[in-house]
Image (cartoon, rainbow, N blue to C red):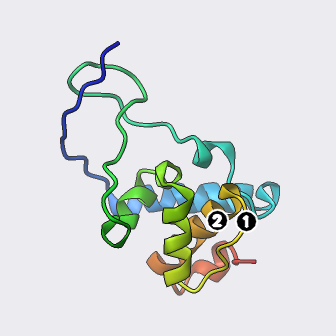
Amino acid sequence: MQEVRQQYDLEYDLRNKFAEVATFIMKNIDEMRQRAPETWLDPTLPDCNYCEQHNCVKPIMTKKKSINWLFLLLGQTVGCCKLSELKYFCKHTRNHRTGAKDRVLYLTYLELCRQLNPEGHELLFSIH
């Protein structure tokens, strides 16, 4: 199938989508062992509104300084980032940034959740 190069806006409900991510982390934190699960490494993407192809709408990545990390978190598409972009995020949030993509992606998700809910993050999970 031919690739469609169209842009359109997506919106997420902040409370509901954050609750989804936080609940997933709470349920799976022990099994993750400080590594991102496959669902984060290879995220399910939205379907195309133009060609109706499934799992194909990727977020548009801009310069590292302009990435909308909140949008990626809520859509659970942070895994679409390159390792260099994830390391950039971790560098600027003072998180450990060496290692494989699954480790850096895991830290990125936890840090984004901590930023969204600084008071409650200790109840949900801790960054190791």
Query: Residue at image x 68%, y 56%?
Result: 102
Looking at the image, which is closer to me, 66 or 31? Answer: 66
Q: Earlier in the sequence, mark 1 or mark 2?
A: 1
Q: Quadrant of the N terminus?
A: top left
Report crowding for label 2: few under 14, some 14 to 19, many 20 or more residues within 10 A (C-alpha). many
Labels 1 and 2 touching (C-beta < 8 A): yes
Quadrant in which residue 33 is drawn: bottom right
Residue 117, given in percent of the width and then of the height, sits at 49, 79
SS for callout 1: loop
Q: Nearer the viewer, residue 54 or 102?
A: 102
Q: Nearer the viewer, mark 1 or mark 2?
A: 1
Disc 1 crowd, CA 10 A, few/some/many (<14, 14-19, 20+) = few
Vertical arrangement, residue 62 with respect to residue 55, above or below: below
| Residue 34 image point, x, y percent | 76, 64
**Image: 102 above or below 126:** above
The residue closer to the viewer here, 38 or 124, is: 38
Q: How many marks?
A: 2
Q: Quadrant of residue 62?
A: bottom left
At 51% across and 85% down in the image, what residue appears?
118
Disc 2 residue type (three-letter): Val
What residue lies at 37% left-to-right and 41% top-to-bottom?
58
The residue indicated by pointer 2 is: 104
Left or right of residue 18: residue 48: left
- Position of the C terminus by quadrant: bottom right
Position above or below: 67 against 32? below
Q: Which mark is residue 99?
A: 1
- Mark 1 belongs to which amino acid? Gly
Residue 68, by quadrant, is: bottom left
